[in-house]
Image: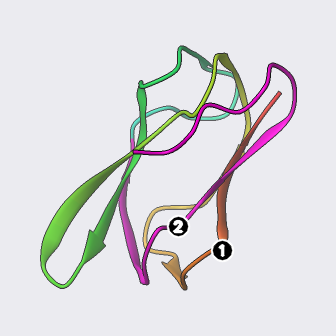
Amino acid sequence: PVAAAPAGDANVTAPMPGTVLNVVAPVGTAVKAGDVILILEAMKIENDIVAPCDGTVASVAAKGTSVNTDDVLATLS
């Protein structure tokens, strides 16, 4: 579980290396803490990447993007 970030700008980072399989919440989507933003595939397992706090998706990695641990997957404002 990820600790809740304070209200305002927040970065959502990759917990492990993988590939963005699907974007569930595109830019402009209002999300609540715990809502799924995207699906990250790592070692053939699909991992839900969730919002750490309430906000609006300001940016999100594109489907098919390869990421490393701690890369920014999305930003919330």
Residue 24, quarter of the rendered image: top left
State the mark number for residue 11: none
> The residue under label 1 is which amino acid type?
Asp
Q: Which residue is drawn at 53% across and 67% down?
A: 14
Q: Quadrant of residue 43?
A: bottom left
Q: In which quarter of the image is the C terminus?
A: top right
Quadrant where the image shows the N terminus: top left
In the image, is 39 to the left or to the right of 57? left
Residue under the image location 42 percent in, 77 percent down: 16
At 47% from the left edge and 68% from the top edge, which residue is drawn?
Answer: 15
Residue beneath disc 2: 14
Residue under label 1: 71
The residue at 27%/70% (across/down) is: 41
Percent x, y for residue 73? 61, 59
Which residue is the extreme one toward the left?
44
Residue 2 falls inside the magenta stretch: yes
Q: Do the residues labelled 1 and 2 touch (CB within 8 Å)?
A: yes
Q: How far apart are marks 1 and 2 (CA)?
A: 5 Å
